[in-house]
Amino acid sequence: MKEQDNCKIFQLDKQRILLVSFGQFEKKFLHKIAAAVQPVIGLPVDIESGYTDLSKYYDPARRQYDGNRLIHFIHSEYAFDKRKVIGLFQVDLFIPILTYIIGQAIYKGNAGVVSFFRLKNELYGLKKDDNLLFERFVKEIVHELGHTMGLIHCYSTICVMRSSTYIEDVDQKEAHFCSKCRQKLDEER
Ligand SMILES: [Zn+2]
Ligand SMILES: [Zn+2]
């Protein structure tokens, strides 16, 4: 029994989260994001600036960037040593079956992407709101990390694992897991 517990602690010790930013993100903003994600996920969160030629992922017909290919890129370039890695983007992302995506992740995998393109008030003709943008971004990052940790969509209105198609959905939910998802998360670990 005791050995089993030790083993669990050892595994937790090794697991870290990495947020890799692509594009003009302010360092201060990224540190704030990491500090907000860390207590919800319960794992150390590192940040790093990523570099790639995003034009390789651009689809001129859709004028958007390919979310699936970007996930594969994140996975192959950054997801090693059991790290869970989320690529942070500013550009509009899509997958073939959807008009756009805010984010996406590999279920029980090590990689995901989130963009704040669709999270900005300005896109909807509303006044710029940096605090709101920050809150929305944190929720979507936690959401995608939840998928990498084995969580599926949740029907609780306020749970961070609730699916968000529209910005209103993002605002309705909170930046943490409901008790059911939290329990599942603990079991997965
Ligand atoms: Zn989801
Ligand atoms: Zn939930």
Image (tube, grey):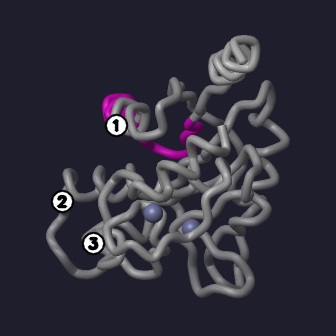
Identified at 51% across, 59% down, the residue is: 115
Is the residue marked 2 within 8 Å of ligand 1, measured from its CB?
Answer: no
Q: Quadrant of the N terminus?
A: top right
Residue 140 horizontal/vertical position (percent):
45, 58
Which residue is outermost to the right?
76
In the rendered structure, which amino acid carries the disc numbered 3? Answer: Gln
- Please tell me whether residue 165 is drawn above or below residue 91 in the rendered image: below
> Does the magenta segment cover residue 3?
no
Give whichever of discs 3 and 1 has the lower sequence position: 1
**Cβ atoms at labels 2 and 3 below 8 Å apart:** no
Displayed quadrant of residue 12: top right
- Disc 3 to disc 1, how far (Cα)? 18 Å
Q: Position of residue 39 (x, y in %)?
A: 38, 32
The numbered disc on residue 129 is: 2
Q: Nearer the viewer, residue 147 or 181?
A: 181
The one of 136 and 96 positioned closer to us in this rendering:
136
Q: Which residues are magenta?
A: 19-33
- Residue 32 lies in the magenta stretch: yes
- Say above or below: 121 vs 113: below
Label 1 element class: helix
Please report whichever mark, 2 or 3, sits nearer to the chain's N-terminal start: 2
